[in-house]
């Protein structure tokens, strides 16, 4: 590739060189090494010509598995991203938004987590909740939120939840009388009393921790047995009732059992009243959404509503959901809907979710942003944006 060739050099100004995506080669090691040398010579040539001064901070990296050649930043080793990939392709929200659920400790985000957070803030998504899905991820999320808070003294942008995801319910201890006992699933990360550990994480990390969860039932994948899921879910609901902390709930193809468990606990005189509940990343049917709303729960919508086919049924039910019961989230890096991204979402994309809600409901984006932010502030007891 000769970017110094006159037509290319004239068409691509120096400040836009980073937008050029280098081809990834899948060739034999010998040819790749030769190409690497040639590419480095090209880099030097560009330096000598002076047309593209940015390449002084770039190098080429050879990967053996899979075999590829990529351009990277010499200082960090991070792959070069074009400006369009590194920034949000969506306009900034007209009013500060809250993304109630991101998985910032996921490998797709954690390596560049500060840049991810800053892109969200630049898009006016100024507060994000880091979802805890296990004791380990809950601790890691708290550490990230605390680090960000310590380095940015103006205000809190990151808050956390603490919980055990239904996929990880098999690690929950002690086991219930009806739950399966699989000692092979136990690791050094397990503790004798999961609830005691959760309680300590929540009470000793205020005001960063604002909810119990992600907890619930997932009958779609069943990575943990249903008995383990139900036991872990019940215990976490009771903890939320004890602490009067909001509940961040995961439900997939398990609405009947989810509502039954909530109703049973609500009827238990020995358990304090239920705190606020949000069914996060809702993908169910209209009848299920109405049942949750009638119980006073909130519904969290992600980028799935923006997808042409997968989100069609959600767009159909949106008009029946009161705006004052809707919360916005991306569930990043999952539920991607923005074209051009490499199959993962970011919290900055919450603006797109809000925009789709506004279009579907036939109201202004400003109304959606103001109301859903107010909902999140009241639900999670966040400081008011005003």
Image (spheres, rainbow, N blue to C red):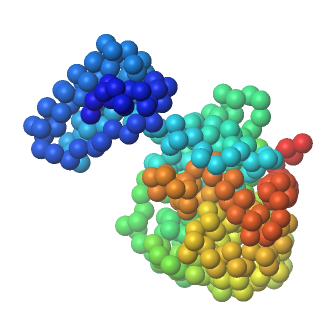
**For this rendering, which residue is in front, 109 or 215?**
109
Q: Please identify the residue farthest to the front as the structure is shown.
A: 7
Quadrant location, the C terminus: top right
Name the residue rendered at 52%, 56% in the picture. 339
Image quadrant where one finds the N terminus? top left
Residue found farthest to the right: 386
- Quarter of the rendering containing residue 327: bottom right
The relative height of residue 209 versus residue 278 in the rendered view (above or below) is above
Residue 327 vertical position relative to residue 121 in the rendered view, above or below: below
- Above or below, 104 relative to 12: below
* Residue 118 percent across, percent down from the top left: 63, 37
Viewer-nearest residue: 318 or 360: 360
Point out residue 20 in the picture as x, y percentages from the top left corner: 40, 36
In the image, 266 versus 107, the foreground residue is 107
At a point 79% along the width and 70% down the height, the residue shown is 361
| x then y, percent, for residue 337 | 56, 60
**Which residue is most to the left?**
30
Please identify the quarter of the rendering in which residue 253 is found: bottom right
**Between 300 and 345, the one nearer to me in the picture:** 345
């Amino acid at each position: 590739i000769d970017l110094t060739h006159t037509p290319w050099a004239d068409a691509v100004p120096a400040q836009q060189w980073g937008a050029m995506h280098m081809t990834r080669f899948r060739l034999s090691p010998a040819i790749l090494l030769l190409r690497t040398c040639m590419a480095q010579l090209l880099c030097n040539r560009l330096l000598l010509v002076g047309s593209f001064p940015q390449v002084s901070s770039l190098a080429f990296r050879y990967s053996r598995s899979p075999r590829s050649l990529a351009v990277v930043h010499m200082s960090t080793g991070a792959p070069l991203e074009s400006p369009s990939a590194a920034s949000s392709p969506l306009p900034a929200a007209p009013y500060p938004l809250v993304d109630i659920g991101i998985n910032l400790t996921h490998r797709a985000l954690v390596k560049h987590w500060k840049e991810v957070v800053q892109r969200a803030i630049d898009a006016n998504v100024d507060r994000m909740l880091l979802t805890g899905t296990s004791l380990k991820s809950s601790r890691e999320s708290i550490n990230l939120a605390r680090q960000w808070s310590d380095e940015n003294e103006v205000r809190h942008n990151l808050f956390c939840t603490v919980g055990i995801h239904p996929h990880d319910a098999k690690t929950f201890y002690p086991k219930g009388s009806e739950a399966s006992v699989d000692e092979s699933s136990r690791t050094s990360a397990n503790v004798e009393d999961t609830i005691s550990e959760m309680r300590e994480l929540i009470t000793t990390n205020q005001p960063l921790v604002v909810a119990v969860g992600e907890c619930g039932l997932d009958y779609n994948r069943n990575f943990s047995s249903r008995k383990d899921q139900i036991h872990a879910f019940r215990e976490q609901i009771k903890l939320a009732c004890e602490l009067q902390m909001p509940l961040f709930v995961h439900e997939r193809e398990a609405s009947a059992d989810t509502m039954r468990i909530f109703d049973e606990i609500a009827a238990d005189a020995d358990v304090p009243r239920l705190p606020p509940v949000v069914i996060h990343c809702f993908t169910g049917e209209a009848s299920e959404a109405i049942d949750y709303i009638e119980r006073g729960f909130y519904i969290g919508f992600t980028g799935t509503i923006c997808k042409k086919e997968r989100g069609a049924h959600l767009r159909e039910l949106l008009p029946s959901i009161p705006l004052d019961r809707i919360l916005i989230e991306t569930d990043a890096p999952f539920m991607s809907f923005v074209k051009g991204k490499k199959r993962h979402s970011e919290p900055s994309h919450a603006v797109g979710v809000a925009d789709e809600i506004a279009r579907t409901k036939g109201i202004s984006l400003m109304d959606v942003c103001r109301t859903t932010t107010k909902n999140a502030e009241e639900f999670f007891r966040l400081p008011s944006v005003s």
